[in-house]
Amino acid sequence: MTARTAPKPADDQPFDFNLDAVQSEVALTPFRVHYDGRRWEFAHMEGLNIWDLVEAAEGGEVSAMTGVFRISLGGQWEDFRKLDFPQYKMKALFTAYRKHCGMEPGESEASGN
C-alpha cells in the first residue's frame, strides 16, 4: 500500500491566519540618545528581528542586553562599542530604552512581552 498525501494548496488559497496583515500596535519610533558628543539612534525593540534576539539571549542576560543594543544600533554598533561605558550608564540606558519601547521591567525582549 502506498502512502497518500494531500496536495499542497497554492499560496493564494484560503488560510487560517494571515501573518502578512499583522501590524505593530505601537509606533516603531527610534530611541535617540546623546552620548560622548554624538547622537545615537536605536531601532524600536518591537521591530527587531526575533531570531537575532533569541540567538543573543542564548548567551545569558548580559549577552541578551548587548545583543539588543548591537541589533538596534545596526551600522552604529562598531563605533558605539569603542566607547568607554560605565556600567551605571549602561543600566540607565537600558532602562530608558525599555521604557521608550513600552516594555515593563522583568519582561523578556526576546518574547516581545
Image (cartoon, grey):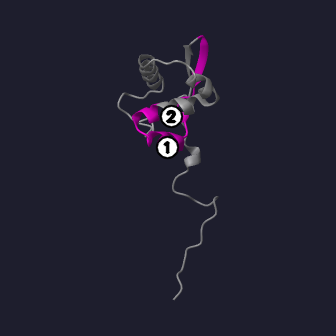
Q: Residue at x 38, y 28 (%)?
A: 104
Q: Which residue is depicted at the point 59% across and 47% down?
A: 20
Residue 25 can be seen in this image: no
Indicate the secondary structure of the residue bearing disc 2. Answer: helix
Circle 2: is it few (<14), some (14-19), or many (20+) Cα within 10 Å? some
Q: Position of residue 22 (x, y in %)?
A: 54, 42
Magenta-span inclusion, residue 47: yes
Vertical position of residue 72 compared to residue 35: above or below: below
Q: Does the stretch in magenta take in 62?
A: yes
- Residue 72: quarter of image: top right
Q: Is residue 65 visible?
A: yes
| Residue ID for mark 2 | 67
Q: Amino acid at mark 2?
A: Gly
Residue 18's spot in the image, x, y percent?
Answer: 55, 50
First-in-chain label (2 vs 1): 1
The residue that disc 1 covers is: 55
Give the extent of the magenta segment: 37-65
Q: Whole-percent x and y of residue 53?
A: 50, 39
Q: Residue furthest top?
A: 37
